Amino acid sequence: MKNNPTYSGIGIMSGTSLDGMDIAFSTFRRINDGWDYKIKEAMTCNYSSEWQQRLSGSRNLSGYDMSILSRDWARLASHNIIEFCSDHSLKPSFIASHGHTVFHQPENKLTLQIGDGAVIAAKTGILVVCDFRSQDVELGGQGAPLVPAGDKLLFGEYKYCLNLGGFANISYDKNGIRKAFDVCACNVILNYLSQKKGLDFDKNGTVARSGLIIFDLLKKLNALDYYKQPEPKSLGIEWAEKYVFPMMHGHNIADLLRTYTEHIAIQLANITKNHGQGDILVTGGGAKNDFLLERINALSNSFCVIPDDKLIDYKEALIFAFLGLQRIQGNINVLASVTGAKYDHSSGCLYQSSC
């Protein structure tokens, strides 16, 4: 693989929103000190209601049932990959699987992404890289965010790279060193509120736009201790359940959506005001929330750049493929300046079932 100037692989991503499994087949080519990339084919395999229930309740499982879930998720991923490759006549050299996060508690030296890489390798016959976070946590890091290592090499022309997924996370260079962290809970809260109105999500932020800001609630949200903590830092669903979800009641849903949208925009504006003006590359589901983007533009001193839909939807899957390639080549794919680990390192477990 090292002698081939162009590398092709599949990245798989499953996020906290539980909407589905993102699969992206991408190619990478080294150009001087950087990399050229192209997402050739991509798709989202939506989770059935049964799978959504299994994943949403996964933290309460016994060790035995967790092992079954991890195996079953890997089998589902393998099935999806095989069909995806067959439909598009693809021959990837490797698969990089983020898996699906069940626990993320770096303060307890614990992070768990289910999806047994050995199963995926056995089912597909393709080299698999998985479990990107555990090594970093053991090295004293947050195990997140990992995408900034790819941001630096693939999207270095932007001042900021912002992903508006279940959680909002941002990365940027400060004096030539990559910095990144989770900003706040994002779609995991907005979607939760939308579902109370019978909607999967608030399309274009239309419901939020119709609401009024609840100023007492906004003040409480902005006063959460997490925002006072120095980087590196990261968030998990446990944090949102403990601190944010309990505040999301007792008011009109439109007003709650309006207030929480303002909260996200304020937290992002605080970052860009502190670290300088520049374009923000925005990806993730929130990049399609027109009202949220309007509020970010209005409050920050920077401008949101919205790429094509393929990059919006599949940037994380693209970058995990890139991180997998770096692991296979023995290159650094996790930055200590981002996660707080003892040192930069090359992370991920490799599984090979064929010769």
Image (cartoon, rainbow, N blue to C red):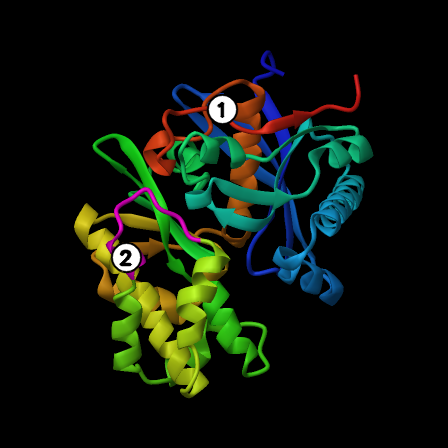
Badge number at residue 346: 1
Badge number at residue 29: none
Question: Which residue is pictured at 46% across the width and 70% down the height?
Answer: 190
65 vs 234, left or right, is right
> At label 1, which amino acid type do we have?
Ser
294 vs 276, left or right, is right
User: Residue 122 versus residue 204: which sits nearer the camera?
Assistant: 122
Identify the image quadrant of residue 219: bottom left
What crowding class fits label 1: few (fewer than 14 Cα within 10 Å), some (14-19), or many (20 or more)?
many
Residue 8 higher or lower than 213, as above or below: above
Residue 26 higher or lower than 77, as above or below: above
Residue 10 higher or lower than 43, as above or below: above
224 vs 331, left or right, is left
Quarter holding the C terminus is top right
Quarter holding the N terminus is top right
Q: Reading the chain from its start, which is encountered first: label 1 or label 2?
A: 2
68 vs 239, left or right, is right
Query: Is residue 312 rendered magenta in the image?
Result: no
Q: Which residues are magenta?
A: 225-235
The residue that mark 2 highlights is 227
Count of number-bearing discs: 2
The location of residue 33, given as percent across then percent down, is: 38, 21
As measured in the structure, the alpha-carbon distance from the residue carrying label 1 to the one carrying label 2 is 29 Å
What crowding class fits label 2: few (fewer than 14 Cα within 10 Å), some (14-19), or many (20 or more)?
some
